[in-house]
Amino acid sequence: MERTLVKGAVYSLIIGLLLGILIYPDTETINNGKGFFEYRVIPLREYIFTVLRFAVTVMFITLIALWVKLEWKSGSEIMEFIAGFFKSFFIVLAIILIVVIVSMFIFNR
């Protein structure tokens, strides 16, 4: 299990870096109005931190997904706890949303 998590972290960090380079541009286009545009080159330090932040986020999401998948297969008690937690979270969220929607209809008339 540990080896799978480490490999997943390394590979997802590399893929996140490559995707970050493709997704985030290194220039910004600013519309000054009246048809004038200004192009600003993002400083290298800011660009690297943006790409790294994206890659680390992808890595942590992948690690969490892999851990949940591996724990789900093993059928441990912690997965029952997590499943119960999410069920109760969504039930309470639904109740709160229903109360907010009903109160909007009652107090806006």
Image (tube, rainbow, N blue to C red):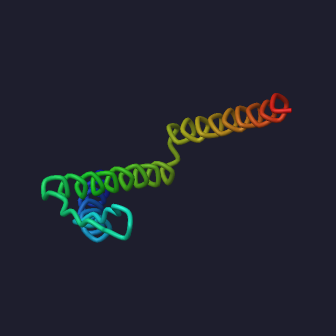
Image x and y of residue 64, in percent: 40, 49
Q: Using residue 34 as the reference point, say whether residue 100 is left or right of it.
A: right
Quarter residue 52 falls in: bottom left
Q: Is residue 103 above or below residue 50?
A: above
Left of 26 or right of it: where is 76?
right
Q: Which image quadrant for residue 23?
A: bottom left
Query: How many numbered markers are drawn?
Result: 0
Residue 82's x, y, as percent? 54, 39
User: Can you give x and y, in whole percent of width and height, for residue 100 in the image?
Assistant: 73, 33
Q: Is residue 15 above or below residue 46?
A: below
Q: Classify residue 36 by image quadrant.
A: bottom left
Q: Quadrant of the C terminus?
A: top right
Q: Position of residue 101 (x, y in %)?
A: 77, 37
User: At 79% across and 30% down in the image, what residue appears?
Assistant: 103
Residue 16 or residue 70, whichever sits in front: 16
What residue is at 19 percent from the left and 59 percent from the top? 42
Residue at the image position 52 percent from the left and 42 percent from the top: 79
In this orientation, which residue lies closer to the viewer: 92 or 5? 92
53 lies above or below 95: below
Residue sitting at the far left: 44
